[in-house]
């Protein structure tokens, strides 16, 4: 328990969304134990406890829970999945490993278990306080999206290197301290204004790249070696295609009419290449690659844990989509041996390739015009 005697719940690292998830946990009348990225201690514990063939996100999750249990945390929360994704078995496996280590922590599953999952039934919070906190968490999720979208847009344009990243961290710290939905909503306007104050070079040419793949690799900057910031500093405007608000809308079926990120819409886009559901975020990876090609993106970067069943199984499909839609796709696999230097080197080479590709494309219209004029003169 915490110093106040309140039970604590360890939640998975979902990057900056962990700030909002901590508020959601408070709706149960308990305290969240969390971080926005996997700690070195958790990674070490996970490598030692997990099966060698397990994927990197599993090792990060189990290490996080072991670290929590060693700190006296009584409960943990593991998300579930469907289809062939092995994540659907990970909650039980986490529980078994922790039990074998003799650590007293109970692991709950969340997702695909009805409107009122076991975690909520277990703590059974009063309805109205519960709903108020959940609403506050949803407000925070929306503001996290706003902060990140502004960061991705401004970082490659900033005149003072690092200023956008510093402001992003300040905004997240303010959001973490906000205790009411009213204060959080007021904070949103202030945050937008603060981003407007960042001096930028409006005329600077930037590349556009989409990030797709497995959720932990997309959201945990320790696991992906901070690819968003690396790309932004290289002059690339990034779009991370895991947004928690859209994901929750799909899970609980309250996505708005016209939302282009619904499972049904994405499945329709990917249907020529992926005819059956395979679980995880493989469907998203295929569909968003097709959409980004249509929307004029320069390239896509697929982040996948080594051995990840759904994501590794769609890589040949992504190769075909890349060829058919003429959009480069960089595929990076991650395990505990992947280094920041190696990731940076691959990203630098990919970005250089995209710049050269854009230059060649810019020459094509003039080349075509020259050839047309030449043929006209010849005919004359």
Image (tube, rainbow, N blue to C red):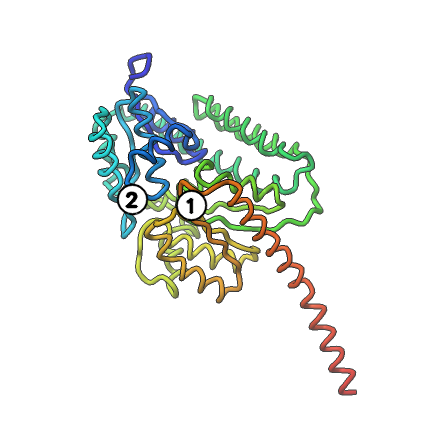
Residue 256 image offset from top left, x and y in percent: 40, 47
Q: Is residue 319 left or right of residue 252?
A: right
- The image shows residue 163, relative to residue 233, as above or below, that is above
The residue wearing badge 1 is 334
Question: Given contact means CB atoms under 8 Å apart, are the residues at marks 2 and 1 in contact?
Answer: no
The image's mark for residue 87 is 2
Q: Farthest residue in the bottom direction?
A: 380
The crowding category of the residue bearing disc 1, from other C-alpha atoms within 10 Å (few below 14, some 14 to 19, many at least 20), is many
**Depth check: 377 or 320 in front?**
320
- Circle 1 sits in a helix, a strand or a loop, which is it? strand
User: How far apart are the alpha carbons under marks 2 and 1?
Assistant: 17 Å
Residue 21 image offset from top left, x and y in percent: 38, 31
**Depth check: 141 or 33 in front?**
33
Q: Is residue 328 left or right of residue 8?
A: right
Residue 270 image offset from top left, x and y in percent: 40, 60
Q: Residue at x 60, y 56 (%)?
A: 353
Q: Residue at x 24, y 35 (%)?
A: 117
Q: Is residue 138 left or right of residue 356?
A: left
Which quadrant would residue 315 be assigned to in this image?
A: bottom left
Viewer-side label of 2, 1: 1
- Circle 2 sits in a helix, a strand or a loop, which is it? helix
**Depth check: 43 or 142 in front?**
43
Q: Is residue 48 left or right of residue 365?
A: left
Q: Residue at x 58, y 30 (%)?
A: 167
Residue 64 image offset from top left, x and y in percent: 34, 30
Work out which quarter of the rendered image holds the N terminus and state it: top left
How many callouts does the rendering have? 2
Q: Residue at x 47, y 59 (%)?
A: 290
């Amino acid at each position: 328990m915490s110093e106040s005697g309140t039970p604590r719940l360890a939640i998975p690292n979902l990057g900056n969304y962990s700030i909002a998830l901590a508020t959601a946990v408070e709706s149960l009348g308990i305290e969240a134990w969390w971080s926005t990225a996997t700690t070195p201690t958790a990674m070490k514990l996970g490598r030692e406890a997990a099966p060698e063939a397990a994927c990197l996100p599993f090792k990060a999750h189990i290490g996080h829970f072991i670290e929590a249990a060693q700190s006296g945390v009584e409960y943990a929360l593991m998300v579930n999945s469907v289809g062939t994704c092995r994540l659907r078995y990970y909650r039980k496996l986490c529980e078994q490993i922790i039990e074998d280590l003799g650590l007293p922590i109970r692991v709950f599953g969340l997702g695909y278990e009805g409107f009122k999952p076991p975690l909520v039934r277990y703590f059974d919070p009063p309805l109205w306080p519960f709903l108020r906190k959940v609403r506050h968490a949803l407000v925070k999720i929306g503001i996290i999206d706003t902060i990140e979208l502004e960061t991705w847009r401004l970082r490659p344009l900033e005149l003072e290197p690092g200023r956008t990243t510093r402001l992003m961290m300040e905004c997240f710290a303010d959001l973490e301290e906000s205790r009411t939905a009213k204060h959080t909503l007021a904070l949103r306007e202030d945050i937008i204004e603060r981003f407007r104050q960042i001096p930028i070079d409006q005329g600077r040419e930037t590349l556009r790249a989409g990030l797709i793949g497995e959720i932990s690799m997309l959201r945990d900057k320790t696991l992906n070696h901070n690819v968003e910031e690396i790309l932004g500093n290289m002059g690339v405007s990034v779009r991370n295609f895991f947004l928690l608000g859209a994901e929750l809308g799909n899970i609980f079926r309250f996505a708005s009419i016209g939302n282009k990120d619904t499972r049904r819409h994405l499945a329709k886009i990917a249907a020529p290449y992926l005819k059956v559901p395979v679980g995880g975020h493989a469907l998203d990876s295929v569909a968003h690659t097709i959409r980004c090609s249509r929307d004029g993106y320069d390239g896509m970067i697929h982040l996948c844990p080594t051995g990840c069943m759904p994501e590794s199984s769609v890589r040949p499909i992504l190769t075909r989509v890349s060829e058919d839609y003429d959009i480069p796709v960089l595929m990076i696999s991650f395990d505990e041996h992947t280094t920041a230097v190696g990731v940076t080197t691959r990203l630098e080479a990919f970005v250089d390739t995209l710049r050269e590709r854009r230059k060649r494309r810019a020459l094509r219209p003039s080349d075509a015009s020259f050839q047309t004029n030449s043929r006209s003169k010849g005919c004359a």
